[in-house]
Amino acid sequence: MDGKSARLTNLVLLLLAVVFTAALTFATAEAPRVFNRFIRENFDVLDLHPAIEPELIEQFMISSHVRLIGYSCLVVVGVLSAVGLLAEKRGLSSLGAIAFFLPTFGHFAGHMFFLAGLGMLRALWLPFWGPLLKLGDIALLPYVILVYPFALLGVDIRRGLAFLAIAAGLLVFLLGTLSWLYARFQKRGTADLWPYRFSRHPQYLGWMMWSYGLMLLAIQAPIPMGGQNPGASLPWLVSSLVIACVALGEEAGMRRERGEEYEAYRSRVPFLLPLPGLVTRLFSAPMRFVLMGDRPRRGRELVIVFLIYLAILVLLSLPFVLLNWPPDLGWSDWPPYWHLMPRVG
């Protein structure tokens, strides 16, 4: 292939990667609006707003059967994800992961933009609304570690950090998609170039980073009519665990297809992030202990891995619930910058 043809090919692949990334991002943002419009046009329900008094919320749930909608949605999406993992159908599990996370977008958009009715998306997590929704708050520990030192200096980096995670996630996803397309074009059995030299699943990593930034925006959103923002860490945690299990399932398939070639690649490139060996071994210890091996080999084991890590992370999040931390208005009110700002005069 001459230089001109190579440049043209690279340009086409880049455009395809950009289109794919833009389409996925738009679909994730557009789906809540479409779903919300469908709910409002076909069901006699109002937007559930967390600022409503608890008594009114109970009346609303009883009269409109919203709690039934929430439980039904959770069951359907959970079964969708489980069936996908058991049958090793990547598309089903990925769809379930996105469905778990869509209410977070509705939660964020409903508070930040006051879009009428969009909060109805939160029906999926309605059975857990309140303290139980904080059962994923261990995922916010990096956010706490990064934000609080700046807060002591009177500098608010919360929104900047959220937008940085979103931008970085989209960039990693774009580079991962471009690398994957280029590897397919070159007929490589294993994509091992560019970001694939540092992560075996850069596209999934990019999605997790992007959704983490969106989750940070959701927890920072003030409640327009007052009340506590319980955050959105549990949906992010569940969806990210599903995605991680999908990646593990893909690796099982690649080992069957590529054999030693993929094993060699797997031995030199980290799963998602390049972490110190001790940290990697610590993270993988529960899986190795239960499965008596370093990887799941069939769908049933993927479900076991998901349940194990979900249980561990929920237990680690319990202190946030038991201590009701952060207090007052929740994450949207943390850190309390007005107490940390230097006094004037």
Image (tube, rainbow, N blue to C red):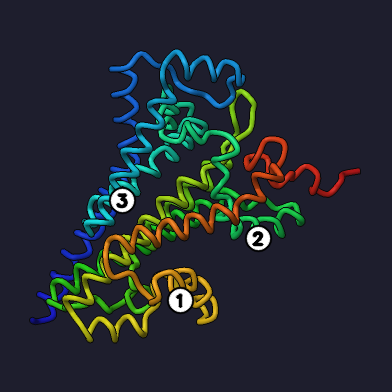
Q: Circles 3 and 1: CB distance less than 8 Å?
A: no
Residue picked out by circle 2: 145
Residue 28 rendering spot, x and y as whole percentages: 33, 43
**Residue drawn at x 63%, y 43% as measured from the top left:** 331
Q: Residue furthest right?
A: 345
Q: Secondary structure at mark 2?
A: helix
Residue density around tag 1, few if under 14, some if 14–19, many if 20 or more, within 10 Å: some
For residue 276, side relative to residue 193 (left or right): right
Q: Secondary structure at mark 3?
A: helix
Q: Nearer the viewer, mark 3 or mark 1?
A: 3
Residue 266 rendering spot, x and y as whole percentages: 32, 80
Q: Nearer the viewer, residue 108 or 190?
A: 190
Residue type, mark 2 in image = Ile
Residue picked out by circle 1: 274
* Placement of the N terminus among the 4 image quadrants: bottom left
Dot 3 or dot 1, earlier in sequence: 3
Residue 253 rendering spot, x and y as whole percentages: 21, 70
Q: Which mark is residue 82?
A: 3
For residue 33, side relative to residue 336 (left or right): left
**Residue drawn at x 54%, y 19% as measured from the top left:** 58
* Placement of the C terminus among the 4 image quadrants: top right
Instruction: Give the Cα distance between marks 3 and 2.
Output: 33 Å
Residue type, mark 1 in image = Pro
**Residue drawn at x 21%, y 59% as measured from the top left:** 15
